[in-house]
């Protein structure tokens, strides 16, 4: 898969910030908290977490060189005290490992890109200090019209040879009850897994497609050359115009899965 485009990803920053705000309202950070952000992207959330623990530190990891480069640029503009307590590393989440180190393992819209979620959460448990918190959000929106239409279009004869085996990323995300059982089996306590649906006004179907280009559409477009990608986007947009109907503004309903848990103190 091609590297991420930070500019495209942040084009809808106001909407992408809403689930982060929900997480921040739930977590409790001591002054000296040790924090890791898995899949940190351009690093703004990592910096905010570090700011909320003025005697602690935060590490953000991401497998995208472009995202880490942008995060480092952002870090250079921070006040010296905050900058010293904040670090970014180019690292694949699948290789993340630590032992009783962190008071918070945080991940926003990243773990859905991996397939073995049990392995990831087992590593999160091992990385947490006793009493440490887990706070994770993953898109769980594969049922929504845009993603369902992507899959349908990709399965049709004109696109199937190139795209027939491509899946929506959200389809790696299970139901809340599956994660409750998984986390309990791994030893977590205080488990809370729940859906929350956000309602984003959009100017129309083309704006939904633009939103999707940064995330859900990437696996499809990465398989195509420039001309093919353009045709796929055009066909998808035309279908979504018909599916969503004429109402303006269009309300784009986006469901996400939130997971909160703790490593037992004892």
Image (cartoon, rainbow, N blue to C red):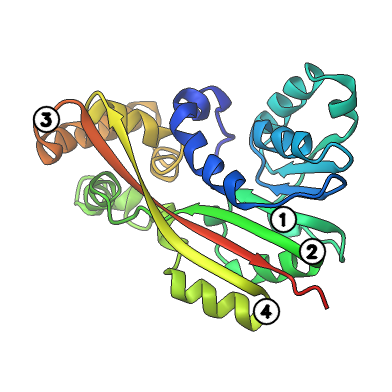
> What distance separates the C-alpha of mark 1 from that of mark 4?
15 Å
Q: Classify mark 3: helix, strand or loop.
A: loop
- Considering only vertical position in the picture, is 71 above or below 216? above
| Residue at horizontal 78 percent and vertical 37 percent from the top | 50
Q: Classify mark 2: helix, strand or loop.
A: strand
Is 35 placed left or right of 217 in the picture? right
> What distance separates the C-alpha of mark 4 from that of mark 2?
12 Å
Q: Earlier in the sequence, mark 3 or mark 2?
A: 2
The residue to which callout 2 is attached is 128
Q: Earlier in the sequence, mark 1 or mark 2?
A: 1
Label 4 Cα neighbours within 10 Å, binned few <14 / some 14-19 / many ≥20: some
- Considering only vertical position in the picture, is 20 above or below 95? above
In the depicted view, which residue is nearer to us: 199 or 121?
Answer: 199
Q: Earlier in the sequence, mark 1 or mark 4?
A: 1
Q: Earlier in the sequence, mark 4 or mark 3?
A: 4
| Residue at horizontal 80 percent and vertical 57 percent from the top | 103
Q: Earlier in the sequence, mark 4 or mark 2?
A: 2
The residue to which callout 3 is attached is 247
> What distance separates the C-alpha of mark 3 from that of mark 2?
47 Å
The residue to which callout 4 is attached is 186
Q: Classify mark 1: helix, strand or loop.
A: strand
Label 2 Cα neighbours within 10 Å, binned few <14 / some 14-19 / many ≥20: many
Q: Which mark is residue 105?
A: 1
In the depicted view, which residue is nearer to us: 203 or 95?
Answer: 203
- Considering only vertical position in the picture, is 191 above or below 154? below
Residue 228 in view in this figure: no
> What distance separates the C-alpha of mark 1 from that of mark 2?
7 Å
Residue 201 x %, y %: 28, 30
Is 201 placed left or right of 222 in the picture? left
> What distance separates the C-alpha of mark 4 from that of mark 3?
46 Å
């Amino acid at each position: 898969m091609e590297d991420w485009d930070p500019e495209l990803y942040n084009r809808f920053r106001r909407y992408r910030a809403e689930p982060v705000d929900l997480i921040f309202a739930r977590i409790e950070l001591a002054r000296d908290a040790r924090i890791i952000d898995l899949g940190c992207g351009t690093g703004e959330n990592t910096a905010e977490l570090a700011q909320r623990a003025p005697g602690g530190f935060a590490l953000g990891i991401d497998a995208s060189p472009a995202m880490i480069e942008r995060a480092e640029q952002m870090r250079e503009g921070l006040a010296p005290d905050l900058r010293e307590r904040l670090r970014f590393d180019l690292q694949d989440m699948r290789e993340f490992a630590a032992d009783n180190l962190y008071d918070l393992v945080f991940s926003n819209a990243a773990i859905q890109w991996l397939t073995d979620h049990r392995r990831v959460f087992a590593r999160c448990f091992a990385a947490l200090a006793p009493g440490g918190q887990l706070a994770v959000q993953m898109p769980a929106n594969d049922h929504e019209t845009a993603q369902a239409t992507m899959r349908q279009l990709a399965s049709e004869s004109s696109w199937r040879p190139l795209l027939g085996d491509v899946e929506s990323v959200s389809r790696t995300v299970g139901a809340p009850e599956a994660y409750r059982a998984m986390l309990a089996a791994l030893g977590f306590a205080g488990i809370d897994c729940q859906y929350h649906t956000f309602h984003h006004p959009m100017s129309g179907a083309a704006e939904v497609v633009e939103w999707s280009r940064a995330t859900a559409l990437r696996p499809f477009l990465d398989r195509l050359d420039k001309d093919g990608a353009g045709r796929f986007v055009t066909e998808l947009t035309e279908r979504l115009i018909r599916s969503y109907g004429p109402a303006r503004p269009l309300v784009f309903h986006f469901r996400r899965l939130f997971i909160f848990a703790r490593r037992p103190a004892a």
